[in-house]
Image (spheres, rainbow, N blue to C red):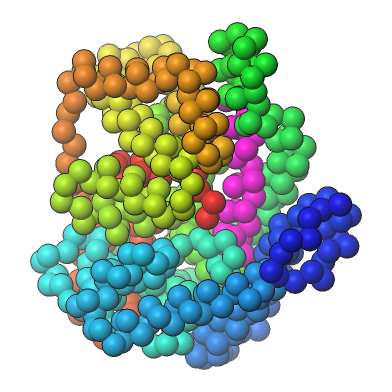
């Protein structure tokens, strides 16, 4: 029988017993499916063209708090207490001081804290293009603040979104903006019907179903813990260890695919997540998408893997830490990511190893890649080799993240003789490392010009037609985040 330990509702205990899953997991899945239905209702009956922003804020907040109460019981008070204390600090201490204590709270609170700080306390010339673009230039009301933090679409599993994007969605302005072509030039505004998210939602729900099926059927046959089984460590050959390591971590990923894709689908079903049209005129619904599965599984570099995994958290790390750090931004960002995840030692082992793997992979790429891009055959060979090395390196790095404790994590690394740690250190010692700069991208410059235009024409929050969600990402900041429980 599944465990009954939960602070949330036990109404679904019979279902928990039937499917042999813990009641908290059943509550989460049912809560998210309920949020999906509520999202369709929200878009249909509380559309911005029919209902005021005030009503949309109220309903989104109340539904979110109800879902939190259903899943977490009295623990849901944490959402209100955390948001309430943070808002009091914002109002009582002023925007000049609010950004510092916010670092110890959650992603949304820290993001909004910095965005308000950038918009109301710093001069425009002091900001990077992306900071200027996301800057919030008036204090949110309490209702707007609670709605942003506690709305039903993201209260259980996120993903993170910028405050400006959320307000634009609530006010119904996300499809009334000009967009940019592939060269970064702003296209003339064209009247378009509001795009339907139905196709995107259906596709994402299919991915959810397949991911859940794979997780329930495959992961039990390839537990990560088997990598530290004494008999396996003593008898398995090196090829067997390498293959099993890759397969066991591959089998562990679908549960993240399921949770993050379902969260994305819920937001899309409510009409949130539209990111303009592509060059073919097709609507894009990836504004707050958290992962790209194909790119993850076919990654040929450490950076490529991390660029496509937990995208919104990587952006958060870039915005609140990497862009603002003056000394060792890569290391500081990894440390913040580890602290944000929690207190388990395995997190710190993973992120410290991740720093080494990231720097070593960068050095290898800068020193050797140019030898292989001259012909298709050599490039293919390079891609195959780097794919295999990347998948093993990522799996090796994240094992402590799954095992959590120090002893089993070190048991795993010792069974591998710390070989990739040693290899990474040797690479950094023996190969010249080209210093990277945190330069501005073309896309950031496009954002900057658009942000200036919005600032000149809007006294409230401005439309955000093409945010940095998937494009404006520094390599180091993107590499500073590994698999999370978010």
Query: Where residue 247 sits in the image (x, y, percent)?
Result: 62, 26
Q: Quadrant for residue 33, please give it.
A: bottom right
Camera sees residue 331 = yes
119 sits left or right of 161 in the view: left
Question: Between 258 and 294, which is closer to the camera in this rendering?
Answer: 258
Query: Where residue 441 sits in the image (x, y, percent)?
Result: 23, 49
Q: How many marks?
A: 0
Q: Residue at x 32, y 15 (%)?
A: 372
Q: Quadrant for residue 154, please give it.
A: bottom right
Q: Residue at x 41, y 42 (%)?
A: 348
Query: Where residue 51 sits in the image (x, y, percent)?
Result: 56, 90
**Would you say residue 338 sits in the magenta stretch?**
no
Q: Residue at x 43, y 37 (%)?
A: 350
Q: Is residue 55 above or below residue 237?
A: below
Question: Between 450 and 385, which is closer to the camera in this rendering?
Answer: 385
Camera sees residue 455 = no
Q: Main secondary structure of the magenta part?
A: helix
Q: Is residue 311 above or below residue 377?
A: below
119 sits left or right of 45 in the view: left
Q: Is residue 331 above or below residue 447?
A: above
Q: Which residues are magenta?
A: 246-267
**Would you say residue 260 sits in the magenta stretch?**
yes
Query: Where residue 300 sits in the image (x, y, percent)?
Result: 43, 27
Q: Residue at x 60, y 8 (%)?
A: 237
């Amino acid at each position: 029988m599944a465990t009954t330990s939960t602070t949330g509702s036990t109404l679904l205990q019979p279902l928990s017993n039937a499917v042999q899953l813990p009641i908290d997991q059943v509550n989460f899945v049912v809560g998210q499916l309920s949020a999906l239905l509520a999202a369709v209702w929200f878009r249909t009956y509380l559309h911005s063209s029919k209902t005021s922003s005030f009503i949309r804020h109220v309903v989104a907040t109340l539904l979110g708090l109800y879902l939190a109460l259903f899943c977490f019981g009295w623990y849901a008070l944490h959402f209100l207490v955390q948001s309430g204390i943070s808002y009091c600090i914002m109002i009582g201490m002023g925007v000049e001081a609010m950004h510092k204590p916010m670092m110890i709270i959650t992603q949304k609170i820290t993001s909004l804290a910095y965005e308000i700080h950038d918009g109301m306390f710093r001069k425009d010339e002091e900001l990077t293009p992306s900071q200027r673009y996301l800057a919030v230039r008036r204090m949110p009301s309490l209702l707007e603040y609670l709605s942003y933090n506690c709305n039903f679409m993201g209260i259980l599993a996120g993903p993170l979104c910028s405050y400006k994007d959320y307000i634009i969605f609530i006010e119904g302005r996300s499809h009334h903006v000009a967009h940019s072509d592939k060269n970064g030039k702003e296209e003339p505004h064209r009247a378009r019907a509001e795009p339907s998210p139905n196709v995107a939602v259906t596709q994402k729900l299919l991915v959810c179903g397949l991911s859940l099926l794979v997780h329930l059927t495959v992961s039990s046959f390839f537990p990560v813990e088997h990598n530290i089984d004494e008999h396996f460590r003593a008898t398995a050959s090196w090829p067997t260890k390498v293959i099993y390591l890759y397969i066991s971590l591959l089998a562990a990923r679908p549960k993240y695919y399921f949770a993050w894709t379902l969260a994305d689908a819920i937001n899309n079903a409510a009409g949130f997540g539209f990111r303009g049209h592509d060059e073919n005129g097709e609507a894009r619904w990836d504004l707050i998408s958290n992962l790209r599965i194909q790119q993850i599984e076919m990654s040929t570099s450490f950076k490529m893997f991390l660029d496509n995994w937990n995208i919104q958290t990587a952006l958060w790390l870039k915005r609140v830490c990497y862009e603002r750090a003056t000394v060792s931004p890569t290391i500081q960002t990894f440390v913040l990511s580890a602290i944000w995840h929690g207190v388990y030692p395995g997190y710190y082992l993973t992120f410290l190893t991740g720093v080494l793997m990231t720097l070593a992979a960068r050095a290898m790429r800068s020193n050797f890649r140019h030898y292989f891009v001259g012909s298709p055959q050599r490039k293919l060979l390079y891609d195959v080799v780097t794919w295999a090395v990347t998948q093993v390196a990522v799996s090796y790095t994240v094992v402590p993240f799954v095992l959590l404790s120090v002893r089993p994590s070190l048991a795993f690394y010792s069974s591998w003789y710390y070989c990739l740690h040693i290899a990474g250190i040797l690479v950094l010692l023996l190969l010249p490392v080209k210093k990277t700069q945190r330069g501005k991208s073309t896309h950031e410059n496009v954002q900057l010009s658009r942000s200036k235009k919005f600032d000149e024409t809007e006294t409230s929050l401005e439309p955000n037609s093409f945010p940095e969600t998937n494009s404006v990402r520094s390599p180091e900041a993107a590499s500073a985040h590994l698999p999370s429980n978010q």
